[in-house]
Image: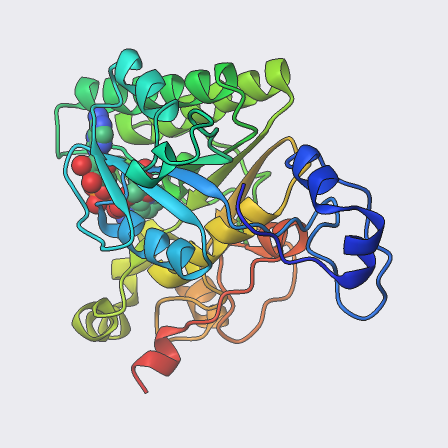
């Protein structure tokens, strides 16, 4: 565990050695009035030692960059290297349990040999590695790789005493994205209570991963948070993709007209690292607005007519509700294509 920023009240009450000893198990709440102390049980801020899987990919490289900016020490475990100057690359195949156990119990770098105190424990695992859609591999391979690697990662984390796992689930669990023909939501906005009965191998693998995670959490009591990530958009994609989305909103029907900025996804991961004590939870992860130019009322009239609308919605409000992430981990997306393209 690295340096922790704590308020003076808390530092007086709980000396550093005691704080370190209680790391990850929720030290007593801070009584400082002015700013929330990061050592409060639900808002622990630390510079953590994080093992990140799949960090060489589209979403992971932005999330890792954000975590490094926050001061976390990150090792990237992937089939291919990321090449970030501040991040160690460890090439591994997560479908091999032996490699996973070994990687999660290894040094993060040569510098960790110096103290002579053995291998430190990881504070958290962020598991993004996967086959990220159908049609890249045969369906059975997508299912096998995604479910087996997730089982291996969580199993190893639990057995090695790592107290936090954050893993990438998907919007596809709601059964709309890769459906044969058009499937409409049972209600809008879609929140985490919406049924998850998809019919494709990729989304099935993500539903299975959520069940795997829930069961491991039940047995171990650690925190395992699943991120039902919407369509990830990198900054350069606002210019290359969104003009078409504005011209034809129907292009976004399978993504529930939503999106998640890759940088905001990084912030969500950090929010989850900082928030302890929730047990097993899943979170929709999306930006606040839709990815199309027409208003949300117009989207509803054109695409969701007859679908129960559970509440009034803002002018461009997303149909992929992110309220739970905001309320439970303090997610506060900062980006919008409406600003980036302006
Ligand atoms: N991109 C999106 O729009 C989106 C949306 C929802 C969910 N997700 C999920 O987010 C995560 C990241 O997606 P992405 O778009 O960055 O995918 P990506 O394909 O760009 O990156 C995935 C990474 O995982 C690695 N990987 C795959 N199999 C591996 C294995 N067996 N061992 C080690 N590494 C392995 C790949 O080498 C790659 O670098 C995935 O879990 C994906 O399912 C992505």
Does residue 90 sit above or below 5 in this rendering?
Answer: above
Q: Which residue is depicted at the point 18% across and 20% down? A: 141
Q: Would you say 85 lies left or right of 112 here? A: left
The residue furthest bottom is 342
Q: Which residue is depicted at the point 83% across and 59% down? A: 9
Q: Quadrant of the C terminus?
A: bottom left
Q: Which residue is depicted at the point 64% across and 35% down? A: 24
Q: Quadrant of the N terminus?
A: top right
Color scheme of the displayed model: rainbow
Does residue 152 sit above or below 197 in this rendering?
Answer: above
The percent coordinates of residue 25 (x first, y second) are 69, 33
For this rendering, which residue is in front, 135 or 249?
A: 135
Count of marks, rendered view? 0
Instruction: For residue 182, say whether it is visible.
Output: no
Q: Which residue is depicted at the point 54% across and 45% down? A: 273
Instruction: For residue 5, say whether it is visible.
Output: yes
Does residue 302 sit above or below 223 in this rendering?
Answer: below
The percent coordinates of residue 38 (x first, y second) are 68, 55
Write down which quadrant ligand 1 falls in. top left
Quarter-wise, where is residue 8 in the image? bottom right
The percent coordinates of residue 32 (x first, y second) are 84, 62
Q: Would you say 282 lies left or right of 6 here? A: left
The percent coordinates of residue 45 (x first, y second) are 61, 52
């Amino acid at each position: 565990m690295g340096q922790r920023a704590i308020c003076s009240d808390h530092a007086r009450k709980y000396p550093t050695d005691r704080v370190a000893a209680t790391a990850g198990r929720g030290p007593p709440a801070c009584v400082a009035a002015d700013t929330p102390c990061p050592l409060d049980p639900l808002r622990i801020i630390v510079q953590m030692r994080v093992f990140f899987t799949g960090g060489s990919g589209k979403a992971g490289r932005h999330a890792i960059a954000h975590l490094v900016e926050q001061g976390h020490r990150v090792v990237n475990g992937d089939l291919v290297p990321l090449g970030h100057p501040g991040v160690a690359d460890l090439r591994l195949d997560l479908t091999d349990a032996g490699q996973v156990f070994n990687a999660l119990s290894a040094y993060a770098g040569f510098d960790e040999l110096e103290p002579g105190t053995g291998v430190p424990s990881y504070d958290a695992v962020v598991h993004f590695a996967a086959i990220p859609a159908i049609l890249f591999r045969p369906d059975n391979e997508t299912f096998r790789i995604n479910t087996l690697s997730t089982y291996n990662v969580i199993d190893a984390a639990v057995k090695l005493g790592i107290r936090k796992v954050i893993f990438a689930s998907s919007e596809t669990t709601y059964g709309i994205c890769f459906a044969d023909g058009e499937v409409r939501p049972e209600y809008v906005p879609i929140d985490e209570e919406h049924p998850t009965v998809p019919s494709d191998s990729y989304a099935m693998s993500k539903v299975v991963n959520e069940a795997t995670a829930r069961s491991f959490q039940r047995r171990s009591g650690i925190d395992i948070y699943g991120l039902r990530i919407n369509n990830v958009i990198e900054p350069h994609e606002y210019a290359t993709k969104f003009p078409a989305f504005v011209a034809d909103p129907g292009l976004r029907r399978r993504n529930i007209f939503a999106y998640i900025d890759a940088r905001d996804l990084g912030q969500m991961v950090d929010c989850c690292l900082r928030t302890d004590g929730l047990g097993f939870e899943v979170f929709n992860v999306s930006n606040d607005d839709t990815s199309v130019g027409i208003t949300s009322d117009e989207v509803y009239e054109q695409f969701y007519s007859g679908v129960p609308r559970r509440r009034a919605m803002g002018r461009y409000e997303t149909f992929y509700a992110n309220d739970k992430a905001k309320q439970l981990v303090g997610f506060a997306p900062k980006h919008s294509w409406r600003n980036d393209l302006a």
